[in-house]
Amino acid sequence: MTTEITRTVRVHADDVEANTRRGGDIRTTLSPRTTGCTSGFGGVLTLAPGEHVTEHYHPYSEEFLHVVTGQLEMTMDGQPVALGPGDSLLVPIGVRHRLVNTGTEPAHAAFHLSPLAPRPDLGHVDTERPARPEQPNPPVGGAS
């Protein structure tokens, strides 16, 4: 059986606003808000040298991270994991995690979270004060 693709939904990172609430430049490109998808959301992130994404966890979603360029360190429940280009990492549901660029060049990574939380406001729990708490969470859309 062949599945026919009936629509193509392409989103370029430059077409979505950067979110810097937890640090870095995080762009949610594929989400219920941008594409109408229903199983998760994902996008790209850039961290300058020494920059970090503040610690948080996801009570409903696994997070998949793939490093494209740069040197990163993900601390998961207090345990550091060094990551470089080509490395992929699974952050299980409920695991506290914090990402930092440990290199001297900007780091770029792609991420995906799945499944979706029942509501967007339940998707992230901050365990460290966000870098820019005045900013909203990334607008992923979905049930509200």
Image (cartoon, rainbow, N blue to C red):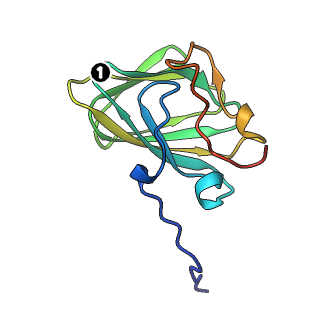
Residue drawn where x is 49% and y is 18% of the image: 131
Residue 47: x percent and y percent? 35, 30
Residue type beneath disc 1: Thr
Q: Is residue 121 left or right of residue 134?
A: right
- In which quadrant of the rendered image does the N terminus lie? bottom right
Compared with 35, 94 (above or below) is above
Q: Quadrant of residue 84?
A: top left
Residue 18: x percent and y percent? 46, 39
Question: Residue reaching furthest bottom?
Answer: 1
Residue on which disc 1 sits: 102
Compared with 78, 40 (above or below) is below
Residue drawn where x is 42% and y is 56% of the image: 12
- In which quadrant of the rendered image does the C terminus lie? top right
Question: Residue reaching furthest left?
Answer: 104
Residue 71: x percent and y percent? 28, 29
Q: Quadrant of residue 101?
A: top left
Residue drawn where x is 52% and y is 26% of the image: 21
**Structural crowding at the residue carrying mark 1, measured as other residues with C-alpha within 10 Å and reported as few (<14), some (14–19) or many (≥20):** many
Secondary structure beneath dot 1 equals loop
Residue closer to the observer: 74 or 53: 53
Q: Is residue 103 left or right of residue 58?
A: left
Compared with 16, 105 (above or below) is above
Residue 115: x percent and y percent? 67, 46
